[in-house]
């Protein structure tokens, strides 16, 4: 075969080799023939495959975007996003996302049976999970201690405020967690729940404090609309953003639905501008969609009135090879991963998200929960769920891991 184009990429350090699988996932649509070496990657591609990329729009634009995301792997460790988490001297001395899971007999933080907001999908205790050790782990940063959550104090501090989670079922997972954490401190507090548009928007208001805790369900943040061709994922449109305005705190999340295919895929086509695509590399699509979200933040968020967070990429544990046990999944796992370096490495989605956030003009704080969540292969519902068919290694039991996400959120709010 005759090769006309080639790209040479020099790798500064050999440890980058650990990203081989993810690099392969991203690079293969553009570079179908490549070989890895300790300090050199030779990428070769044929003229015919360059022509195929025209289906994704401009040849030059598509090629440069692939290459840009490809190169982001090389500099991810250098340009860590966690420095944007807190604008304080405390952040310089302690990274709350670097630490270990320790067994704590005082956990869990609440009883799921007494939480009126609990969803059957996450209620592993009620639906028969036999082991209980997954309830007992507390996140311990290496350089500091996280304050124990106090729901009564939280209500007083955010009296009259509006806090909204925006995203998919993992945002819902986190919203229920915070609601239960608060309720456990004030079990007799009066509250109302109002649902709009079915279950798209849910508002929980603690009446004695005027705190409104909302969750807006959206799989991709950008719009999915019905058009003549079918359901279309519009990579450059966020009309639903009108629901997010006027909040005091916004916590965004999006990733899992971007890689769904077949019957689970909530769209039939993708559109950007006037161009319609049957499909494209999902990391590129995610980058485009999150770039649209970042433009919405830059345009509509007033940092003096609204604090914005991004929840970070929540990992899955369907493949045991990610923690060096290739024959396993999350099923029957009862202990966290206790090593310091998770074998599965950094998810490509985290690298893409980091690239988008590095270009934001407004302050957005990344709740960098990916690595600490990767350790928790034991914390999923598995098969102990009230309304999820089959094995669930994607969502999280409650009480459980999302409680830690909310402790980190509370700490970041200051």
Image: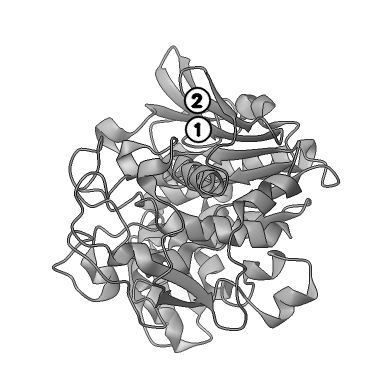
- Report the front residue among 246 and 130: 130
Residue 187 pos. (x, y %): 52, 41
* Image: 15 above or below 51: below
Could you tell me if the residues under marks 1 and 2 are in contact, i.e. CB atoms within 8 Å?
yes
- Report the front residue among 314 and 403: 403
**Label 1 vs 2, first from the N-terminus:** 2
Residue farthest toward the top in the current orientation of the protein: 228
Task: For marks 1 and 2, give the one nearer the viewer.
Answer: 2
Question: Residue 388 bears which disc, if any?
Answer: none
Q: Residue at x 37, y 37 (%)?
A: 119
Left or right of 215? Residue 332 is: left
Which quarter of the rendered picture does the N terminus lie within? bottom left
Residue 400 pos. (x, y %): 40, 57
Q: Which residue is mark 1?
A: 218
Residue 180 pos. (x, y %): 49, 45
Residue farthest toward the left in the current orientation of the protein: 327
**Disc 2 on helix, strand or loop?**
loop
**Disc 1 on helix, strand or loop?**
loop
Left or right of 270? Residue 87 is: right
- Give the image quarter of residue 190: top right
- Give the image quarter of residue 230: top left
- Report the front residue among 189 and 52: 189
Q: Residues within 10 Å of mark 2 (few under 14, many from 20)?
A: few
Residue farthest toward the right in the current orientation of the protein: 304
Residue 96 pos. (x, y %): 60, 72
- Whether residue 66 appears in this view of the structure is yes
Left or right of 77? Residue 48 is: left
Q: Residues within 10 Å of mark 1 (few under 14, many from 20)?
A: many
Which quarter of the rendered picture does the C terminus lie within? bottom right
Q: How many marks?
A: 2
Q: Which residue is mark 2?
A: 200
């Amino acid at each position: 075969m005759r090769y006309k184009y080639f790209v040479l990429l020099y790798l500064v350090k050999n440890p980058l080799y650990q990203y081989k699988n993810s690099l392969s996932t991203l690079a293969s649509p553009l570079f179908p023939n490549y070989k890895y070496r300790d300090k050199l990657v030779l990428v070769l591609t044929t003229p015919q495959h360059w022509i195929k990329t025209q289906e994704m729009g401009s040849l030059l634009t598509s090629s440069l975007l692939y290459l840009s995301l490809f190169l982001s792997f090389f500099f991810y460790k250098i340009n860590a996003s966690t420095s944007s988490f807190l604008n304080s001297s405390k952040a310089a001395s302690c990274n709350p996302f670097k630490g270990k899971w320790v067994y704590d007999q005082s956990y869990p933080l609440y009883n799921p049976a007494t939480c009126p907001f609990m969803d059957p999908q996450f209620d592993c205790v009620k639906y028969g999970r036999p082991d209980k050790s997954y309830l007992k782990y507390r996140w311990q940063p290496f350089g500091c201690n996280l304050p124990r959550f106090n729901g009564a104090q939280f209500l007083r501090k955010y009296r009259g405020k509006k806090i909204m989670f925006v995203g998919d079922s993992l945002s819902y997972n986190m919203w229920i967690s915070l609601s239960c954490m608060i309720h456990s401190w004030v079990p007799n507090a009066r509250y109302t729940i109002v649902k709009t548009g079915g279950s798209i928007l849910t508002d929980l208001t603690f009446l004695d404090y005027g705190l409104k805790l909302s969750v807006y369900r959206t799989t991709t943040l950008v719009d999915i609309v019905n058009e003549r061709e079918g359901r279309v994922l519009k990579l450059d449109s966020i009309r639903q953003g009108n629901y997010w305005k006027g909040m005091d705190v916004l916590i965004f999340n999006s990733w899992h639905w971007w890689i769904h295919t077949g019957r689970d895929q909530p769209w039939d086509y993708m559109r950007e501008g006037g161009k319609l695509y049957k499909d494209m590399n999902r990391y590129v699509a995610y980058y485009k969609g999150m770039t649209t979200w970042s433009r919405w933040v830059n345009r509509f968020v007033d940092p003096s009135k609204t604090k914005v967070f991004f929840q970070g990429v929540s990992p899955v544990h369907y493949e045991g090879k990610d923690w060096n046990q290739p024959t396993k999944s999350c099923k029957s796992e009862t202990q966290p991963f206790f090593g310091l370096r998770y074998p599965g490495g950094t998810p490509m989605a985290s690298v893409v998200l980091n690239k988008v956030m590095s270009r934001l003009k407004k302050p957005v704080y990344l709740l960098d929960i990916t690595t600490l969540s990767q350790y928790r292969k034991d914390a999923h519902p598995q098969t102990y769920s009230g309304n999820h068919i089959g094995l669930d290694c994607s969502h999280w039991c409650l009480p459980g891991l999302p409680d830690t996400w909310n402790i980190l959120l509370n700490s970041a709010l200051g």
